[in-house]
Amino acid sequence: MNTGLDYPVMGSPDAGNTAWVLASAAMVLLMTPGLAFFYGGMVRAKSVLNMMMMSLSAIGVVWVLWVLYGYSMVFGESSLGGWIGDPRQFAGLTELVGGTYSAGSGPVDIPLVGTVPALVFVAFQAGFAMVTVALVSGAVADRMRFVPWVVFAGVWATLVYFPVAHWVFALDGLTARTGGWIANELRAIDFAGGTAVEINAGAAGLALAVVVGKRRGWPREAMRPHNLPAVMVGAGLLWFGWFGFNAGSSLAADGVAAVALINTMGAGAVSMVAWLVVEKIRDGKATSFGAASGVVAGLVAITPSCTAVTPIGALGVGAAAGVACALAIGLKYRFGYDDSLDVVGVHLVGGVVGTLMIGLLASSSMPPGVDGLLYGGGLAQLGRQAVAVVVVLTYSFVVTAAIAAAVKLTIGVRADPQHEVDGIDEHEHAESAYEFASTHGGGGLFGKTAPPA
């Protein structure tokens, strides 16, 4: 294998590691349709298709940009002191599809990231970008038009997600000589995206919700989830995909992946219990909606810390996230921002909790080899984690607000008042999620019956 400074590094992939990252890439991709179910079940019946389309459209929008320049912006040679990758280096992925192949024995000298084919890593990381963009949409459910959302999603991915992902995920020597500043200069620990994915999406959701404005009738009118089974199915799909999200980030079928997997399981489980306990004490009932939300809160929090804490530490992270997020979802009523599906309460708060708790609960017995404050490590790592939180949160909020304001001023973002009252599925997509009654025997394309013979 070429271990010099030329990128991409060429060599023969490890079959076992490649198989694991291929599977993980598929699991991460499933998270975006899973999120569509999760979010879709939370909204009212009249806007469920619009909500699901906002999630699913992220796959198409992000993939096009990822191939053209997004992957290169994230994993290209760093410039401006670790703030952005070279968008030209891997543009179009042309440098990653070459190599030599041996008939009958597979590839023998192809571009690699670690020990897996570079193209597998491209697909794996694309799933992160897709689900992050989709997460933001939950903050503006029931009221944002589809075309402005697609425009916003493309610009936001370019100006916010790609730079922040470079700061966090581009390790020196992984895909280029120098990578992002948070990972390499600040040395904050974020294994799978507590800052780049969760805090980034949560801060963006808050900014977008403020610019777009409140739903009509909120908070006076009850706006309850219309399909709780769909919410629970979505949570299950997210939990399944999260094993690939976290354990797959090791890029190898090894002990690091095993630690990430077991901690992901533990944090999700205990966070669900913690959320239900808060509900029972506060409201007198433990709900299915709370169970699903608690699982996601724990998964969010363990994402940055899944290899830095022990299995007992993971239980602590999950418990803290379950309690904090269950309490945080009420903040929107106190401060008056309409975060429809609690992107702020779950993803921003959960991401902050998980990222900061590394500075408290990290153990040097785990792969990063760092002790947090409660393990005798002092305040240094906690300070690094706090800087990463503040910078990502601030950057994402400010730039997102600017993007949203620009879209609002140019093409508008808000559904027509009457369309919002009637339901934006019908007006934005000419469809209805549920056909409760029909005057004819069957419907053809777009729900229209065939003319009589």
Image (cartoon, helix red, strand yellow):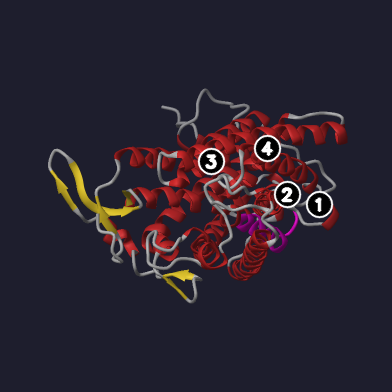
Residue 439 belongs to magenta span? no
Q: Mark 3 points at which residue?
A: 260
Task: Tell me the kind of residue under disc 1.
Answer: Leu
Of the residues tagged 3 and 1, which is closer to the observer? Answer: 3
Image spot of residue 428 (x, y percent): 57, 49
Q: Mark 1 points at which residue?
A: 331
Task: Tell me the kind of residue under disc 3.
Answer: Ala
Asked whether 60 or 172 is in front, the reply is 172
Describe residue 167's horizontal placement relative to residue 361 as left or right: left
**Residue positioned 71% across, 48% down in the render:** 340
Image quadrant where residue 434 sits: top right
Q: CA–CA distance between discs 3 and 1?
A: 31 Å
Position of the C terminus, as image quadrant, is top left
**Residue positioned 62% across, 26% down in the render:** 437
Q: Name the residue under label 4.
A: 315
Q: Mark 2 points at which residue?
A: 345
User: Mark 2 or mark 4, which has the lower sequence index?
Assistant: 4
The residue range painted magenta reads 199-214
Image quadrant where residue 208 sits: bottom right
